[in-house]
Image (cartoon, rainbow, N blue to C red):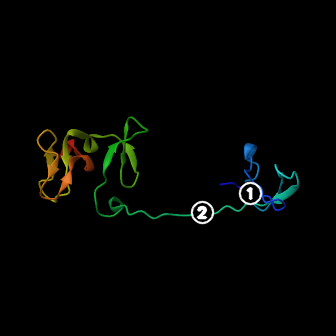
Amino acid sequence: MSDLTCPYCGHEQEVCHDDGFGFEEDKRHEVKCHECEKLYHFTTYISFSYESIAADCLNTEKHDYKQSRWYPNKVECSICGDVKAKTDDCQTTVNFWDCECEDDYQHKTSDEIHCSRCNSDRDECPDSRINEL
């Protein structure tokens, strides 16, 4: 996919954005076609698009904190992205995991990798929090 099409010969070309060239809006930017070598102008229009994502932990559900990939002493919610310092109340252990059941939702990893009550699998569920064991 190219940035521009020459208005004279139809040749497609990329805009070299080195040093920020071509990003300024409300300005005519002058370029030379690589094919026919004619000069022409282009203008820049920047648009934004948004995507909404449900994050139940911002409402009534619990956050799903896991070790942050970027910060060694922090945890990050896998649902909403909240990052906070690692504390005892959100440290988890790989030795237990939480299924989707309302009660009796913690399972020992070495004993079972599937919950037959809610049909959850270990590899799709979070590690258990140490303070909830």
Q: Secondary structure at mark 1?
A: strand
Residue 74: give its label. Answer: none
In the image as oriented, which residue stretches furthest toward the top? Answer: 72
Closer to us: 75 or 36: 36
Left or right of residue 63, residue 53 in this image: right
The answer to which of marks 2 and 1 sits earlier in the sequence is 1
Q: Secondary structure at mark 2?
A: loop
Q: Badge 2 is on which residue?
A: 48
Amino acid identity at mark 1: Leu
30 versus 18 height, above or below:
below
Q: Is residue 77 visible?
A: yes
- Do residues under tags 2 and 1 come within 8 Å of each other at their CB atoms? no
Amino acid identity at mark 2: Phe
| The N terminus lies in quadrant | bottom right
Residue at the location (56% across, 64% down)?
Answer: 49
Give the number of the mark in front: 2 or 1.
1
Q: How many other residues sit within 10 Å of disc 2, few (<14), some (14-19) or many (≥20)?
A: few
Q: How many other residues sit within 10 Å of disc 1, few (<14), some (14-19) or many (≥20)?
A: some
Disc 2 to disc 1, how far (Cα)? 20 Å
x, y (%) of residue 22? 76, 53
Residue at the location (31% across, 53% down)?
Answer: 63
In the image as oriented, which residue stretches furthest toward the right? Answer: 38
Residue at the location (14% across, 38% down)?
Answer: 110
x, y (%) of residue 89? 25, 44
x, y (%) of residue 23? 73, 53
